[in-house]
Image (spheres, rainbow, N blue to C red):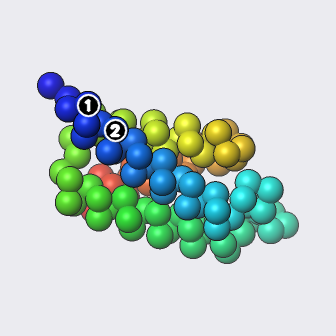
Amino acid sequence: MFNSKRSRQIEEFAASLARDIASRCPPEKTHEEDHLSMALAKAIDEACGRAAAYQREQGLGMFGKAKFGTAFKYQLKDVGYPDALVDSMTRQLLFKMSAG
């Protein structure tokens, strides 16, 4: 059975990654002309690295990763990032967690 305390910790860490991305590159500054801004690319890359390290330390299973991804995604949406960008960032983060 899934531990509710651990579940909250997973959600809090995922939300903190999303807030960190938002503080470094607010939604209105995500693109430079027709591509992602360098600030957003760096923020995503660092968040992916931190998420992969968290995965290695915590050994999240399928449900833990799903909980992580959902919390990350909803925090980004709450901040105001466009849905397509949120989906892309979430996919990238979960891929890095699974590969790392």
Residue 49 seen: yes
Q: Residue furthest left?
A: 1
SS type, badge 2? helix
Q: Is residue 88 above or below residue 30?
A: above
CA gap between label 1 and label 2 equals: 6 Å
Query: What percent of the width, then of the height, locates residue 96?
Result: 37, 58
Classify residue 5 by image quadrant: top left
SS type, badge 1? helix
Q: At label 2, which amino acid type do we have? A: Arg
Query: What percent of the width, then of the height, locates residue 81?
Result: 69, 46
Residue at image point 57% right, 73% down: 42
Seen from the viewer's position, the closer of residues 27 and 86 is 27
Q: Which residue is mark 2?
A: 8
Q: At label 1, which amino acid type do we have? A: Ser
Does residue 33 appear left or right of residue 8 in this picture? right
Query: What percent of the width, then of the height, locates residue 17?
Result: 48, 56
